[in-house]
Amino acid sequence: MLSTGAMRAHLLAARLAGSVATSREESLRSYRLFAARDPRVLIGIDPEWAWGERELIELMADKCGVSDDPGYTSGHDVIDPELTLEALDAFAERLAAVAERGGPVLFGTGHPHRLLGFYAALADALSAAGCAVLTPAQGHSVDITTQFGLRTYNLDYVRGVALVREPRASGSGGETGAHTHSPLPVRTALAAAADAGGPLPELVIGDHGWVCGAGQLGFEAMGLADTDDPALFVGEAEGVVSVVVPLDDAVRSDYYRPLTRYVLNRACLSQ
């Protein structure tokens, strides 16, 4: 079993926490856009409270450990590994609860090149525990506005984890999927599940719009988020999102494997 100390050391060594690659400039830009209610940064959350840039900095300092000084405007952002560990334990607790009930779950990622393996291992463990890992709307088209204009993607599943692909992608395994923050894929999946008469997920696990979009629709949702993703932490603060784990969401994919072991051990789901 990976100890808390070993997990903390890994978080720092892999730069999943501590000084991370995400820049302060990127984070502050996201906070300004969120305060302006830019849908590219809201990613499915419809905040009830007024969130100005200063309030967002304070929230992110509390949830992630970034500097609470508005005058700190450049350099690398910082994530407190103790907050990451605390959130990983809460994440594991929710996994254990849904596993005990055998509840249906839905996984989705906007970071397939980095996080697919992490979610797929959790999906395997929950499936072995008797949970149905849902795959609604496979092959459905989703129109997403990108920096290059409106693009059409196809919803696909790899090892039980939803992602979107460009239509020309073969899906043969050589191409993992597209990066997206959009909540439209999870809305498409949940609508298809409802239209089919269920089952609907008791828990949605993922990142970006997968968490925010599902949480805003009233589904329990939890996942991972970086310091430039304030929407998930706002959702958590407002009670729309269940658990958010603060970490760098774009390091090498193999660096997330110890997190998988840690979470599954804590949830008593190790195989």
Image (cartoon, grey):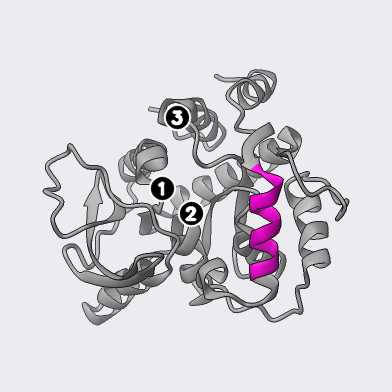
Residue drawn at 59 percent across, 64 percent down: 241
Helix, strand or loop for the magenta stretch, by majority: helix
Q: Which residue is labeled 1 in the image?
A: 111
Q: Position of residue 245 (x, y in %)?
A: 61, 46
Image quarter (top left, top right, bottom left or bottom right) of the C terminus: top left
| Circle on res. 252 | 3
Side of 96 where 237 appears, left or right? right
Label 3: how many Cα within 10 Å (few below 14, some 14–19, many 20+): few
> Residue 208 at x, y = what percent?
49, 58
Sequence-first disc among 3 and 1: 1
Range of residues picked out in magenta: 23-33
Q: How many marks?
A: 3
Gap between marks 3 and 1, in whole Å? 11 Å
* Image coordinates for residue 261, horizontal then vertical, percent: 48, 27
Q: Which of the two discs, 2 and 3, labels the residue nearer the N terminus? A: 2
Judging depth in this view, the residue of 7 and 71 nearest the camera is: 71
Residue sitting at x 40%, y 58%: 180
Vertically, is 227 above or below 148? above
- Disc nearest the viewer among 2 and 1: 1
Q: Sequence order check: which comes first, mark 2 or mark 1?
A: 1
**248 part of magenta stretch:** no
Question: Identity of the amino acid at label 2?
Answer: Asp
Which residue position is annotated with label 2?
Answer: 207
Q: Locate residue 146: give its quadrant.
A: bottom left
State the CA–CA distance, disc 2 to disc 3: 16 Å
Q: Is residue 164 above or below residue 246?
A: below
